[in-house]
Image (cartoon, helix red, strand yellow):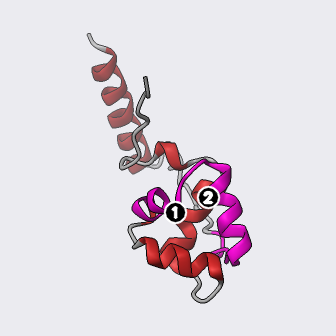
Amino acid sequence: MSEFFDELMTGLNEAVAIERGELKGRKTVYEIQPVKTYDNNQIRAIRNSVGMTQVLFADYMGVSSKTVEAWEKGTNHPTGTACRLISMLENKTFESLPFVKKVAIR
């Protein structure tokens, strides 16, 4: 049969064995790290390190360019979800996001 069918049957057989007590089930535990905060200099450095303008960074963050400008001046500070997105830029994992597409420039 197909590889998909084989994997499906293996999974179903494991589920039946777990239900019968013949196998111990597996579980995955996720530990969520605390939200990291960023100061104005860090935000600017991270944005520059990935080659984004303030306008492009604002589009990525889903905020206005005025908001980015205020973050970089230190008059406002990103919180929560915004800090999570910034950490993805900092760790260079942003390209795996479904709303980020790499475009070839000719």
The quarter holding residue 36 reads: bottom right
| Residue 83 seen by the camera | yes
- Bounds of the magenta segment: 33-60
Sooner in the amino-acid sequence: mark 2 or mark 1: 2
The image quadrant where one finds the N terminus is top left
Q: Which residue is mark 1?
A: 54
Q: Is residue 78 visible?
A: no
* Circles 2 and 1 in contact, beta carbons < 8 Å: yes
Q: Position of residue 5 (x, y in %)?
A: 27, 21
Of all residues, the one furthest to the top in this rendering is: 1
Q: Was residue 90 drawn as part of the magenta stretch in this picture?
A: no
Residue 1, compared with residue 42, is above or below; it is: above
- The amino acid beneath tag 1 is Gln
> Observer-nearest residue: 69 or 42?
69
In the picture of the structure, the residue carrying the numbered disc 2 is 47
Viewer-nearest of labels 2 and 1?
A: 1
Name the kind of residue labelled 2 in the image: Arg
- Residue 70: quadrant of the picture: bottom right
In the rendered view, does 95 fall on the left or right side of 5? right
Residue at position x 52%, y 63% from top? 85
Indicate the position of residue 92 as horizontal and vertical percent values. 62, 47
Which quadrant holds residue 66? bottom left
85 versus 17 height, above or below: below
Q: Is 7 placed left or right of 36 in the picture? A: left
